[in-house]
Amino acid sequence: MNSTVKTLLHSGAALTDAALERLLPGPEVLPHSIHRAMRHSVFAGGKRLRPILCIEAARMVAAHGASGGSEFDPRGAAELGAALEMLHTYSLIHDDLPALDNDVLRRGKPTCHVVFGEATAILAGDALQTLAFQTIANLRTPAATTVAILREVAAAVGTGVGRVGEIDTGLPPGMIGGQVMDVEGEGREPTAPLVEAIHRAKTGALIAVSIVAGGLYGAAHAGHDAGASSDIIARLRGFGENAGLAFQIVDDVLDMTEDSAQLGKTAGKDTATVKATWPAVYGIEQSSKDARDLIAGAFAELAPFGEAADGLKAIAQYLVERKN
């Protein structure tokens, strides 16, 4: 890992953790059990990739074309990133439950239901989801920006990003929709269309919206007009969709090539449960190539941002080079 990426990961994680500490109720706050369970999973040592992508997208957009004004303060974007981390952690708590993946290890620590019981774990996930949307609603952004971020995030974690009411967004289903497809596809022979649909929804949607939401925050900070913001968000969405799919492909490869100690979660579970994974369809070598190609496509989306995109590109490159 080069020094630039190491610095970005360290500073982004520190900003996110500070925001999470401010936003989450302390372990002494009643009712103790739920707040301790929430904190157990949130502070279990995650990489904070989604908040970091959010912060870097906000920083890039705020810097792009900005003239004068105050210097970008990443602490506000970190609160948005913290909300996204709450949503990610809620999904992990529920994903690890006996009814779903039945996993006992997450981020190198016992899973929430193992420590606190199933009922409290379910409620801890629910509480994190609720607090995430409360946090976004309280962002210090113009009302129109706050609503736009809420709309994007709510759709990305739900069951049907591809259709909102009568409007076909052209986007993949959201995170929960992807989880449903994953559960229903378990034990069946994986196909290329099924694997891509699951990956773009279950993992990719939240990664993509982290970047899009960060861009919306940064555009508001920089005072971009609606036309400029529309083009910026389209490019960020393309970047995020490519990076999100690449991230999950690498996760699939690591599940087959690394051990539990390296991953911080139970290795080999995808193979054992006949999960729909990229290597199951394409093999490990082709999967690694596909991830690299997706990142190259993601980089192309950021060409107009010039040097302002260097941080976001560095993090995306790390997504396909990581070992856990």
Image (cartoon, helix red, strand yellow):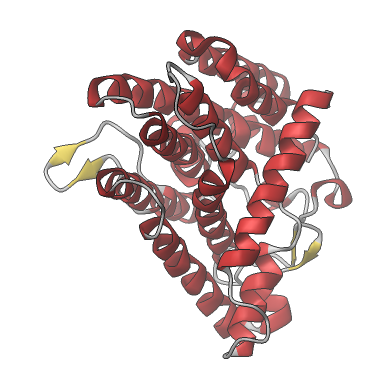
Q: How many marks?
A: 0
In this view, the residue in front, 121 or 86, is 86
Q: Nearer the viewer, residue 162 or 11?
A: 11
Q: Residue at x 62, y 20 (%)?
A: 313
Q: Is residue 165 visible?
A: yes
Is residue 215 shown above or below 260? above
Task: Tell me if 234 is positioned left or right of 278 in this view.
Answer: left
Tell me the quadrant of the picture where the C terminus can be found.
Answer: top right
- Would residue 54 appear left or right of 201 to someone viewing this image? right
User: Within the image, what quadrant is residue 228 found in?
Assistant: top left
Of the pair 55 and 165, the residue shown nearer to us: 55
Would you place residue 159 above or below residue 77 in this image? below
Picture coordinates of residue 47, whole percent (x, y): 71, 46
Q: Is residue 101 left or right of residue 44?
A: left
Q: Which sits in the foreground, 249 or 55?
A: 55
Q: Residue 125: horizontal and vertical position, in percent? A: 53, 70
**Image coords of residue 161 (percent x, y):** 31, 43
Q: Looking at the image, is 110 positioned above or below residue 198? A: below
Kindly tell me whether residue 47 is visible in this rendering: no
Residue 22: x %, y % from top left? 60, 65
Q: Residue at x 70, y 71 (%)?
A: 40
- Give the vertical position of 226 relative to 144 (above or below): above
In which quadrant of the rendered image does the N terminus lie?
top right
